[in-house]
Amino acid sequence: MNKIVQFVLIIPVMFLANLAWAQNAVQGVIKDSEGHPVEGAVIGVVGTSVSAITDSTGNYSLKTKKQPPFSIQVSVVGFKTQVVKVEQLPIPSSLDVALEVDNLDAVTVVARRREEKVQDIPIPITVIGGKQIDEAGAFNVNRVKELVPSLQLYTSNPRNTGVNIRGLGSAFGLTNDGLDPGVGFYIDGIYIARPAAATLDFIDVERIEVLRGPQGTLFGKNTTAGALNITTRKPTFKPTGAVEISGGNFGYIQAKTSISGGIIKNRLAGRLSFSGTQRDGVIQNVRTGKYINDINNQGVRAQLLFTPSRKVDIILSGDFSQQRPDGYAQVIAGVAPTKRPAYRQFNQIISDLNYKLPSENAFDRKVDHDTPWRSNNSLGGVSLNADFKIGPGTLTSTSAWRYWNWDPSNDRDFTGLQVLAKSQNPAKHQNWSQEIRYAAKLSSRVSGVVGLFALGQEIKVNGTEESGSAQWRFSQSSTSALWATPGLFEGYGINTNSKLNSFSAAVFAQVDWNVFKGLHILPGIRYNYDEKQAKFDRKTYGGLQTTNAALIALKKGVYSDQAYNISTDERNWSYNLTASYKFSDRLNAYATYSKSYKPVGVNLSGVPSGTGGVALTDLAVVKPEDVSHIEFGVKTMPTKRSTLNATFFNSDIKNYQTQVQAPDVSLNRGYLANAERVYVQGVEVDYNISVTKYLTFYGGVAYTEGKYKKFTNAPLPLEETGLTISFKDISGGNLPGISKWAGSLGGEVSTKGRFFNNDGKYFLALESFGRTKFSSSASPSTYLNIKEYALLNARIGFNAGKGLSVFFWGRNILDKNYYEQLLPAGGNAGQFAGVLGDQRTYGATLKYNF
């Protein structure tokens, strides 16, 4: 904590100056040639950095010290860029602009910490607008992945969530608080340290930028696989608001509302947004008669915008979100025969216990779990973002405090038997972050970004795992009658207390040098410092109290005590070099080489023990991943109304962070460490085309190949459990979670019209997503492969920029049964469970903008 304070104190103290500068206010409405409001248009004062973005009603408001004559430029995807000249004072009270349809190259993003056209950026990037998110019902990242083929999200509960890009970011199916994610997750520039945030509802989102590949020389936290950059809608001085309510099958109901407006004229504005989502369960627990895996989410976001002068913008934000579902239960999907003796096979075990599964078909969606599923998830925080126009650029300070509380309960044996009576790891996490960054156009040929970043985290876990009456039969590893000793394991368990304190600091910079017309060279560099201190303490309790050495040995074979303290730190340099050449306004090509590092990790789930049961603490530190990445891409505009982009990439990773198995059979325990080497390579193609103003299409396809180049001490796959060795060389095997082919395809046809005296458009849209089979096991397994699947979504309705909108939507309208993840039960008796994809859902939405 002291290091965090010291780092923050050395950041220059920012001052609020020039409060009384004379300013000219410019506001109005941007519409298309037929009078419909245009959302997301960028309005800028030519020759300055002053700009604004229109809201859903087409309104904008900005201030400038510049005196007439000056020009206002308006640009937005699908329309001709238009320049309006302001000749004299007073400026019209409403400066409205009508746009004409033109091309698709004007999408602007802030991926490189400044506004620029997405087609000019030498980074593979997908931009999803808030309007598309709202209409498609994509209320969290799990839905957005259907729009971006290279984006993967896997979650068996909020804590066990991994966000990957191109198959990299987090080791598939592996969650451990001692490892950092490799995909950066940002909301309004704030780094969200834990991936649980990805399962919560979006609140008032303006757009999402999905950046693929390392981004460490631009973003605060080092990101070796990519980043999700989410931008929410900002406060406006002109009063605006929206109310939305949706209803659907399975008792689905969602309510959203937002209101924004000025508090002090041209100085202070605010925005308040709320979202609430509920849905009945979709899996029946036949033991209790309840339907579980429901949705119960609430969230609120509040923002204050303070503009003391034309050179200063300050936004104070606060948000709170929570989930309270009876959910995230998994259904047994099958049983794999293992290499253990016949009496240790799952079907023989349950037969001996006179137990039968409620169904042998996972898509009957029936369970009989005897331990309740609880997935209480709360997170939120406050942030202060200040932008100061200084010289040729903008100095930005972003300060944030965030927390995450996780309160779970799981039935990890996936049956109605009392094998594990308790399985829960409640966690409390909080982090502080500070970023200060200066982005400027230094000359007509040179621009760049330089910044400092600091992040401090504290995680506390108080976990419990406790055996039930059937544990003895699942743990039985010999024919000794002692295993059946009454009460030997019942109530026997472990309490695990762990704590992690970590500190990260970095300085980073990137330059964009326009060598000559069309050619840009972009070098970037980053210095990282990471420090982690961990405490781990696991203690056994309960079960039969006995002095019999043989019985004690059986108990210790199931659970044992362990404690250790670890402290480690790491320093390294990351860098990248990009060259891009714009052959014409319609063709931009680039090549990138980068070197980056995923931070050092620590084991917070225990390590193997040596002689006398002493923890082998030298195995508790996980080396940083060493990532070498190359990329070649082209961004094209075949016509004025279309874009076609392609990217080839190759990532080579040394010391891949994953779970390994000790080659020494006497140390038979998995733990976090490093696979020697893996690689991921592939090709991505995406396109957008506006055939006419009323007919548009989009699509994308990704071919990805990921393999272990060298991994000699991997855990055994499920079906090989019971071999005389406890590890396997899986070099050459496929990385989990990666489909060779994934793609999305969609389109919309619309026509202008009126509905209840509101101007707008009638539309019909279809969206599809598909992927080929992929492995759902760290070590390739015959039984844990997920088959290919494709989903079809649709929406139809009327959308008004202002006033009443109504549309109907359906997701997975062909009612495809599919798995999102397969995972073995604890103990590896052979049974494995599935995270089921949602069946067909449908509903309607009413929205009113004012």
Image: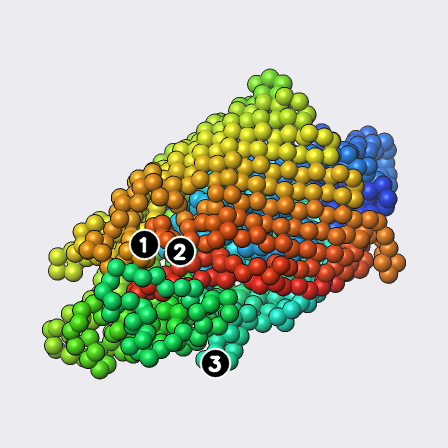
Q: Secondary structure at mark 3?
A: loop
Amino acid at dot 2? Leu
* Residue drawn at 52 percent across, 55 percent down: 198
Count neighbours of disc 3 (C-alpha within 10 A) and say few if under 14, some if 14 to 19, many if 20 or more. Answer: few
Residue that mark 3 sits on: 288
Q: Nearer the viewer, residue 643 or 270?
A: 643
The quarter of the image holding the C terminus is: bottom right
Q: Would residue 241 appear left or right of 663 to someone viewing this image?
A: right
Q: Residue 352: x, y in percent?
A: 28, 77
Q: Nearer the viewer, residue 843 or 531?
A: 843
Query: Quarter-wise, where is residue 519 in the image?
Result: top right
Amino acid at dot 1? Pro
* Residue drawn at 63 percent across, 63 percent down: 841
Residue that mark 2 sits on: 784
Residue that mark 1 sits on: 717
Q: Nearer the viewer, residue 374 or 620?
A: 374
If you read the primary sequence from the N terminus, does the residue marked by circle 2 or circle 3 appear first?
Answer: 3
Q: Residue 795: x, y in percent?
A: 71, 56
Amino acid at dot 3? Thr
Q: Are marks 2 and 1 in contact (CB under 8 Å)?
A: yes
How much space separates mark 2 and mark 3, taking CA atoms?
Answer: 29 Å
Count neighbours of disc 1 (C-alpha within 10 A) and say few if under 14, some if 14 to 19, many if 20 or more. Answer: many
How much space separates mark 1 and mark 3, taking CA atoms?
Answer: 34 Å
Q: Is residue 808 above or below residue 662?
A: below
